[in-house]
């Protein structure tokens, strides 16, 4: 990215200091940056002491065979013991670990003592089904407590899990079962979605007819909806309530090497088969526990934490299951969608449980903005004290709305940049330290080394733009791509020698703070200028009539690419005379004439992945009148038909 335009389009002057009281009592202060900068490995060795080790590690990092890292390699520990048993041993057995809220309104509060019993039973059941350390277990469940219990039971046995999002198709499930060579699948009859039971088990049955899944010997089925006639394969399928229910409530956890595999999680990527990202035990748990403590300022005695992600996404792994439970947190787990049965459901849950820390995604915030300010205003949200964002760059407009309407204009927003591959958060403000800027993830967390480089791998000066890279190994980094070391090297470590290439465009502002600009594949080239999709989208969303925007570069004979914007409108209709011209002019005024979209197309929905990321690849196909590629990771494939029908000349 040679051109200045990328770096200097968006100007954001607003600043928000941490609330004085939060700063005065913060878990982590500015001193942490200095300590970590002076001795990065010593800093992480200290953080590893948050965990209870069966054998304390004496080594911190073994980087003798880069980029294949080993952290705390001579230490041994059990992850489930750290997330559950030790809290009970410390007298916290009566503390609620999980407040479960089912979509139909059923609820369950599970204490740490109960969690210990249930995880032990599940571990005993998996043992009875023949699972031993090293075996892979696929988990295909809705957002119910059994999802967390199943993950912890696998961790307890040293059996790496591969959680597959419950909305994925039978094909996607089969590919993942095959790649990991899973031996057991844990699923449910179904779950609740948008007010209706939605079946899961049929997808498992179908997946297991496909080649490469023959090694699955058992399917353990949770009864959640109880409403379907569940097809049953005798000798393979067993009910959770039968097999888990009759087990002993005690189980002695075994300690595993710090580098023992903990889980595989597949990222779809835009091309090729999904990558099985491999995470291991000691370093991973150290970083997710530390970042959850530092970034959310978590006080486990008093906070009620809620991460709205699905466990099928890395955010659910690190910040629903492992980080919060390692820290002894009390958390909310919600099964359904934010607008079932009404658009205030989330805020009702915040009010009901007194949620203090909320972690969600920009896509959800933009949806709430669209539904209107009056909806959250009906609820008491005064318990909220820290707000988190993850998954995409958060547009400054959405950031301001989140702060004002959810955070009462005082709760700090922590915009956390990280990836499935990084395992834990990497860039984020600290709520008691950082003066925040709407839309910026700002700087690497203590102990993390990141910067922005140009095409020649040179660090860009403040004010410059290029690619985000990580320059030192970190404890929760992926160890490889499951079964494909070469792809690990090619994908992440070959673009810039000795640096991890994250695949995101980024810029540094005049203070050296980092702004994420979207995936590099999405950056547009217009008449020789590199333009970030994120910035054009943010400019569009800052217009009062735009609720959401997705911008792509379409091949153009004159300008290489031209900017094509898909927008969801609010308070107006697509027939609004002159609106398209008004929006083009608005972007031109905000960012400069070069960033004016050539086409602006109002649409009803945008194609999103399950974690809420806009699938620009599909929109590019539409804008260039191509057949759609793989839509298997889309939440609702019907939206593409609607969008295509909008296009002039579309079939
Ligand atoms: C945790 C997660 C990773 C990609 C990442 C980037 C985008 C995530 C972001 C963000 C800007 C943030 N991303 N957080 N972009 N600001 N705070 O989302 O993992 O699903 O693997 O996606 O998401 O593009 O490279 P994953």
Image (cartoon, rainbow, N blue to C red):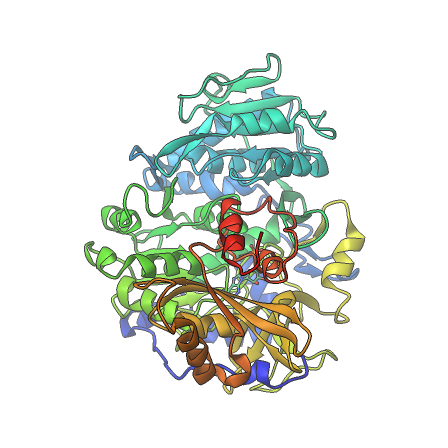
- Front position in the image: 422 or 644: 644
Q: Is residue 361 above or below residue 179?
A: below
Where residue 570 sits in the image (x, y, percent)? 33, 62
Q: Quadrant of ligand 1?
A: bottom right
Q: Which residue is pictured at 54% across the width and 74% down the height? A: 598
Q: Which residue is pictured at 34% across the width and 37% down the height? A: 103
Q: Quadrant of the N terminus?
A: bottom right
Q: Is residue 108 above or below residue 2?
A: above
**Image quadrant where residue 407 sits:** bottom left
Give left or right: position of 266 versus 84. Answer: right
- Front position in the image: 524 or 121: 524
Residue 51 can be seen in this image: no
Where residue 617 sits in the image (x, y, percent)? 61, 58
**Image quadrant where residue 36 sits:** bottom right
Residue 140 can be seen in this image: yes
Give left or right: position of 291 versus 128. Answer: left
Total tally of numbered discs in the picture: 0
Where residue 557 sits in the image (x, y, percent)? 69, 74
Q: Which residue is pictured at 49% across the width and 57% down the height? A: 646
Give left or right: position of 303 versus 393. Answer: left
- Front position in the image: 579 or 357: 579
- Front position in the image: 75 or 421: 421
Where residue 546 sits in the image (x, y, percent)? 38, 67
Q: Is residue 554 above or below residue 558?
A: above
Q: Is residue 266 above or below residue 603?
A: above
Q: Report the residue that reaches farthest toward the top.
A: 234
């Amino acid at each position: 990215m040679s051109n200045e335009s990328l770096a200097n389009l968006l100007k954001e002057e607003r600043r928000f200091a941490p609330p004085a009281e939060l700063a005065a009592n913060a878990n982590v202060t500015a001193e942490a940056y200095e300590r970590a900068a002076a001795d990065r490995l010593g800093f992480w060795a200290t953080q590893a002491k948050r965990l209870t080790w069966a054998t304390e590690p004496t080594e911190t990092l073994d980087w003798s065979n880069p980029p294949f890292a080993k952290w705390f390699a001579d230490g041994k520990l059990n992850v489930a013991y750290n997330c559950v048993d030790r809290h009970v041993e410390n007298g916290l057995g009566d503390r609620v670990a999980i407040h479960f809220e089912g979509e139909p309104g059923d609820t369950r509060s599970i204490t740490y003592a109960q969690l210990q019993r249930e995880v032990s039973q599940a571990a005993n059941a998996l043992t009875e089904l023949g699972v031993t350390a090293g075996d892979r277990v696929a988990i295909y469940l809705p957002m119910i407590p059994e999802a967390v219990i199943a993950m912890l039971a696998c961790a307890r046995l040293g059996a790496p899990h591969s959680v597959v999002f419950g909305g994925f198709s039978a094909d996607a499930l089969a590919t993942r079962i095959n790649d990991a060579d899973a031996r057991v699948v844990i699923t449910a009859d179904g779950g609740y979605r948008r007010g209706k039971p939605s079946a899961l088990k049929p997808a498992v049955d179908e997946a297991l007819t496909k080649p490469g899944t023959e090694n699955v010997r058992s399917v353990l089925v949770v009864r959640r909806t109880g409403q379907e006639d569940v097809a049953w394969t005798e000798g393979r399928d067993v009910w959770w309530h039968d097999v888990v229910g009759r087990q002993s409530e005690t189980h002695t956890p075994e300690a595993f090497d710090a580098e023992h595999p903990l889980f595989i999680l597949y990222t779809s990527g835009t091309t090729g088969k999904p990558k099985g990202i491999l995470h291991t035990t000691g370093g991973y748990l150290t970083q997710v526990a530390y970042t959850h403590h530092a970034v959310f300022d978590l006080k486990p005695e008093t906070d009620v934490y809620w991460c709205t992600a699905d466990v099928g996404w890395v955010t659910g792994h690190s910040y629903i299951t492992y980080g919060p439970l390692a820290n002894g947190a009390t958390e909310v787990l919600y099964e359904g969608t934010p607008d079932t049965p009404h658009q205030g459901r989330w805020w009702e849950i915040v009010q009901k449980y007194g949620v203090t820390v909320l972690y969600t995604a920009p896509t959800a915030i933009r949806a709430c903005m669209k539904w209107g300010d009056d909806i959250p205003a009906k609820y008491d949200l005064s318990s909220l004290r820290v707000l988190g964002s993850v998954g995409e760059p958060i547009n400054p407009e959405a950031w301001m709305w989140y702060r004002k309407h959810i955070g009462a204009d005082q709760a700090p927003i922590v915009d956390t940049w990280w990836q499935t591959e990084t395992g834990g958060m990497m860039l984020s403000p600290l709520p008691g330290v950082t003066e925040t800027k709407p839309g910026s993830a700002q700087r690497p967390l203590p102990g993390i080394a990141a910067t922005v480089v140009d095409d020649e791998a040179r660090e860009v000066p403040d004010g410059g733009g290029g690619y985000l890279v990580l320059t030192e190994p970190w404890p929760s980094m992926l160890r490889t791509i499951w079964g494909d070391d070469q792809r690990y090297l090619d994908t992440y470590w070959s673009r810039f020698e000795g640096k991890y290439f994250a695949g995101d465009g980024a810029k540094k502002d005049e203070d050296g703070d980092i702004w994420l600009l979207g995936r590099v594949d999405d950056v547009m080239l217009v008449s020789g200028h590199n333009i970030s999709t994120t910035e054009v989208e943010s400019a569009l969303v800052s217009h009062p009539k735009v609720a959401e925007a997705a911008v792509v570069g379409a091949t153009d004979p004159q300008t290489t690419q031209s900017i094509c914007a898909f927008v969801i409108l609010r308070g107006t209709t697509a027939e609004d005379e002159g609106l398209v011209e008004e929006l083009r002019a608005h972007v031109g005024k905000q960012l400069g004439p070069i960033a004016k979209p050539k086409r602006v197309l109002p649409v009803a929905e945008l194609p999103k992945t399950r974690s809420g990321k806009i699938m620009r690849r599909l929109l590019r196909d539409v804008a260039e009148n191509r057949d759609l590629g793989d839509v298997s990771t889309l939440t609702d494939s019907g939206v593409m038909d609607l969008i295509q029908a909008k296009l002039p000349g579309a079939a």
